[in-house]
């Protein structure tokens, strides 16, 4: 069941048991790294749970299934509520939770139950989290809550104590490759899967963001070190004007991965590198760079990523990173 979502068999089996009559938890927590199918499985489970068909569920024919259209991202089902932040990257506000809570006064319309999915539940304001807690402490009759987050520890301990947790692990890289290939990613699917840490969703986002172009920029810089005129070279790169915060994060991440691979080659662990398609270029850098320099360079790239993630000026961080990497090569 739910073959649309790859893997997570143990969690699927647990959810299948919840379809049977009997006592069931009123709140579930799906947690694990982003882009591995947590939300998609939650949606397919909710559609199945609400289905009113008489045979195998979801039947795909009843009014409930018709109104729960996952393929077209259309959820007009009166017994389903999807709570998300109003804008990407923003917090879920208390007003949104209160609006959801108003639905507690209404009985189910089509199905025997109501399902509420709260996506990125760790991104709630403190007020919103406490408002949700009240609902979980006294759950409305027939309601099932599914909270989704990457990090369970971002939720209030009191919220965690009232949910049944389902941990989602990253799928096998070979499975991720097959997903990418099904989405038309033929070249470098293996590399893309590795760079995304085994997250199919992240890998597809990387592709859209032009990750291999960013990797080329990072590799070209490493190949030119040490620089004769560092400040002139930085001005010529124009990274500060070219890349916003999101792209700057991806660029520094490519520095981390490239330098990590070089370090692995220098340590005799070539079988663990990510960027297998540019092995020859990495081997040349591994041979020409002192081991201690590579180690310090990895630390510098990681620090740069952390600084950008903390909203330090991407332009300043990128320029400082180039200067740091150049200085390390000259020592």
Image: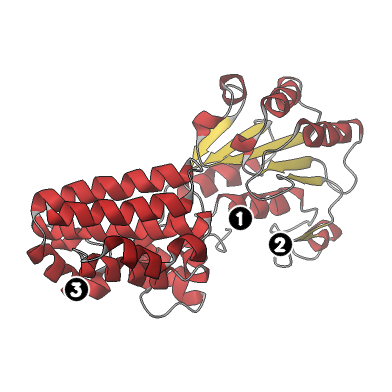
Label 3, residues with CA under 10 Å away: few <14, some 14-19, many ≥20: few
Please give the name of the residue rendered at 54% of the width and 54% of the height, measured from the top-left corner.
37
Q: State if disc 1 and disc 2 touch (CB < 8 Å).
A: yes
Label 2, residues with CA under 10 Å away: few <14, some 14-19, many ≥20: some
Query: Could you tell me if residue 6 is visible in this image?
Result: no
Nearer-N-terminus badge (2/1):
1
Nearer-N-terminus badge (1/3):
1
Nearer to us in this view, 171 or 297: 297
Q: Residue 153 appears at what percent x and percent y? A: 50, 29
Q: Quadrant of the image for the N terminus?
A: bottom right
Image-based side of 8 in relation to 28, left or right: left
The mark found on residue 292 in the picture is: none
The mark found on residue 281 in the picture is: 3
Residue under label 2, please give it: 70
Above or below: residue 47 compared with residue 280: above
Provide the secondary structure element on which disc 2 rests.
Answer: loop
Image-based side of 138 in relation to 319, left or right: right
Q: Residue 232 appears at what percent x and percent y? A: 33, 66
């Amino acid at each position: 069941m739910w073959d649309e979502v790859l893997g997570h068999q143990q969690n699927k089996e647990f959810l299948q048991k919840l379809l049977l009559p009997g006592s069931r938890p009123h709140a579930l927590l799906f947690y694990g790294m982003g882009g591995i199918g947590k939300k998609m499985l939650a949606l397919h489970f909710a559609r199945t749970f609400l289905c009113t068909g008489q045979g195998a569920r979801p039947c795909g024919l009843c009014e409930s299934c018709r109104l729960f259209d996952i393929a077209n991202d259309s959820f007009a089902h009166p017994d389903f509520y999807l709570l998300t932040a109003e804008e990407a990257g923003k917090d879920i506000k208390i007003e949104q939770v209160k609006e959801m809570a108003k639905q507690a006064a209404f009985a189910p319309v089509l199905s025997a139950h109501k399902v509420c999915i709260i996506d990125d539940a760790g991104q709630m304001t403190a007020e919103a989290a406490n408002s949700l807690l009240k609902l979980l402490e006294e759950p409305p009759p027939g309601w099932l809550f599914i909270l989704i987050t990457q990090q369970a520890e971002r939720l209030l301990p009191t919220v965690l104590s009232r949910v049944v947790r389902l941990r989602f692990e990253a799928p096998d890289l070979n499975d991720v490759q097959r997903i990418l290939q099904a989405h038309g990613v033929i070249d470098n699917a293996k590399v893309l899967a590795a760079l995304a840490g085994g997250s199919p969703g992240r890998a597809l986002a990387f592709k859209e963001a032009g990750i291999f172009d960013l990797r080329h920029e990072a590799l070209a810089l490493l190949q030119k070190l040490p620089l004769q005129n560092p400040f002139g070279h930085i001005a010529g790169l124009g990274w500060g004007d070219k890349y916003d915060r999101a792209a700057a994060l991806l660029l520094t991440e490519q520095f981390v991965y490239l330098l990590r691979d070089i370090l692995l080659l220098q340590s005799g662990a070539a079988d663990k590198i990510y960027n297998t398609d540019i092995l020859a270029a990495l081997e040349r850098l591994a041979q020409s760079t002192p081991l201690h320099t590579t180690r310090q360079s990895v630390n510098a790239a990681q620090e740069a990523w952390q600084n950008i993630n903390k909203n330090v000026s991407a332009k300043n961080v990128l320029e400082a990173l180039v200067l740091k990497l150049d200085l390390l090569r000259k020592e």
